[in-house]
Each structure stands twice: as C-alpha cells, then as structure tokens.
Image: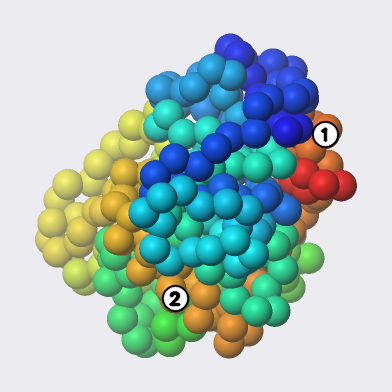
Amino acid sequence: MKATFFETTGTPDVIRVGDLPTPEPQPGEIRVKVLAASINPIDTYIRSGAAPMQLPKPAITGTDFAGVVDAVGSAVKEFRPGQRVWGSNQGLLGRQGTCAEFVCVEEKWVYHTPDGVSDEQAAAGALVGITAHLGLFQRANLTHAETVFVNGGTGGVGSMVVQMAKAAGAKVICTVGSEDKAAEARKLGADATINYKTDDITARVKDATGGTGVNLWYETLPPSDLDKTVELMAPRGRIVVMAGRQARPVFPNGPFYVKGLSLLGFAMFNMTPAEQRACADDINRWRTEGKLTVLIGAQFPLSKTTEAHQLQEDNTLRKSGTLTGKIVILPNA
C-alpha cells in the first residue's frame, strides 16, 4: 500500500511517500480502506519530536481517518466489511497513522459514519470534535443557558466548540482575526465575535455578558494571561486548558479562589475509549441533525503530505494566517 511515513523525527522534509506492507487486522482490529485523513497540530509535534512518543518504525503520520471497513479480525463485534466508519487516536502511543491507503484500528476507536456525511467531513472533524466535546462536557459539564468564551472561533477545535456549545443551548463569544472570520464564526452560531487584533477583548467580553462574566472559558491557545481570564470569569466558572506544553503563566491565586473558579486540563489521547465514544455519539447525532460542520481549508493528495505538514506548522507555530479550517489528505487522489 502507499503511505506517508518517517524513520526519524525532524522537519517536514523527513516525511517519505512509498510502499509499505498492507497491514493485517489482529484480533479486535478493523482494517479500514482510508478515503480521507486529516492533519492536526499534534501530528506535527509527533513528527518533529516536540511531543515524544513511542512510535513504530517506520511511523505513518496522521491521527484521523474516515473510510470503509475492508476486513475485520477475530472478536470484532460491531463492524463488518463495507460499512463506512471514522475515528481518531491513531499515529500515537505506538499506533500506526492514517495517511495511508489502509490502516488497522482497534474496534474501540472506530465509529459508524452517518448517512449523508462525507468522508472528508468525518475525518476532518474527528480529533477536533472529540477534543471540543471532552472539554465542554466531560471536563467542564456545560449546561443550558451558560456563556462560553473560546479563543479562535474558526480554528479546528474552536469552531467545534462554537457549534457544540450552541447545540447545547449556550451563548457563545469567540475571538477571530478578521472580519471574514467573524462572519464565518457567526455562521457557525457565535453570538458575539471579538477581533483580537483590533478590539479591547476585556471590554467586549464584559459588554457581551452584561458584566456578569463567562461561565466556561475554553482556551485553545497556550495560556499567557490568566489574570485577564480570571477577571472575566463569572463566580464558580470553569477554565479549560488543552494547549501549551511549554506555557508557564503566572497564576492569580487570590482572585481565582475568591470567585470559586475551577481550572480543568486534559489531553484527548489520555481519555478512555468509553469517554471518547460518548463524544462520537453526540457528534454523529449533531451531524445528522445538521448542527455540526467542519471548516476545511485545504486538501492534499497523499503525495503532498509534506506540504500539508508545512502548512499546518506555519499556521500553528508561526501564526502565518494562511489557513482557516482543517487540512484533509486524500489517499486516492
């Protein structure tokens, strides 16, 4: 099979495109013919060595996938050949990645793809959708009529947070970097958008909440100013952090405990299969109801995976602003 892989960590040019043996499903595994994969920041961190992990050699890149069940191993209960499926959690912790014509996945990490949902949408929304759901509901227990703030309302995770919070009946405030992105965020359901380049974020959040503050702050960026965040929180609010491995912000202890706030962190790949399946069930339901869509900013054939990694890295690390939405890899293009 054709695959994109690397033998050693480093810059995007360590990625190679070539033939590898087609994997055989082991007991409890499903072999998926991959019709779409996607690139996430974590894929670039693993490839560069910034997020050290146990990896096979060679290591196929890619976390997310969507496609068709091609074969099943013994003891597989829920899936059979020909069914459309999607999932995430590959390409890390010793598992092979998804930027290949085929991938073998443990049944516990596989979900059915609803009718009417494209493979591109299913793959692009996998990691970011599960991540957004875990933060909002498993960690922060979002309830109806609360106010959510999210940095980056058109980013991969941020756009999912906007839509899921709205689906749950919350009010949503988000930051954007341009008027075009503000319009896109409003299409997704954002009640208020704040241009972080030109607006006074503190003043705008206070205005949008009527001075009562934010109930749930979903921080998709490395935290740098927790003083500002705590100032804008409502009593007993929750702050979710899931980015910034090297971030060491000063912690405003006094204002934090006086307001009775909670600080909640998580990494998606540390969450259990059962916790993630609950996310997938809601994601599938919202997709079927037309309440959840993924912004896709670029699509590449398998042979251009190096360029896809470079584009992701330029936008994640260097803030080039050349990407809105997710990157999709099409193995059969």
Percent position of residue 78, x then y: 43, 66
Q: Is residue 255 left or right of residue 10?
A: left
Which residue is disc 1 drawn over? 304
Kind of residue at disc 1:
Lys
Picture residue at 77% right of the left edge, 54% below the top: 297
Q: Work out whether mark 2 precedes mark 1 in sequence or the reverse, and give the earlier one.
A: 2
Give the numbered dot on residue 238: none
Residue 43, image x, y percentages: 57, 35
Q: Is residue 18 above or below residue 22?
A: above
x, y (%) of residue 243? 43, 42
The front one of 222 and 46 is 46
Mark 2 vs 1: CB contact within 8 A: no
- Viewer-side residue, 289 vs 115: 115
Q: Mark 2: which amino acid?
A: Asp
Identify residue for label 2. 282
Under circle 1, the secondary element is helix
Answer yes or no: is residue 202 visible. no
Residue at position x 60%, y 76% in the image: 114
Is residue 49 at all visible to an observer of this figure? yes
State the residue at coordinates (43%, 73%). Answer: 281
State the residue in front, 204 or 105. Answer: 105
| Callout 2 secondary element | helix
Residue shown at the point (30%, 61%) measured from the top left = 274
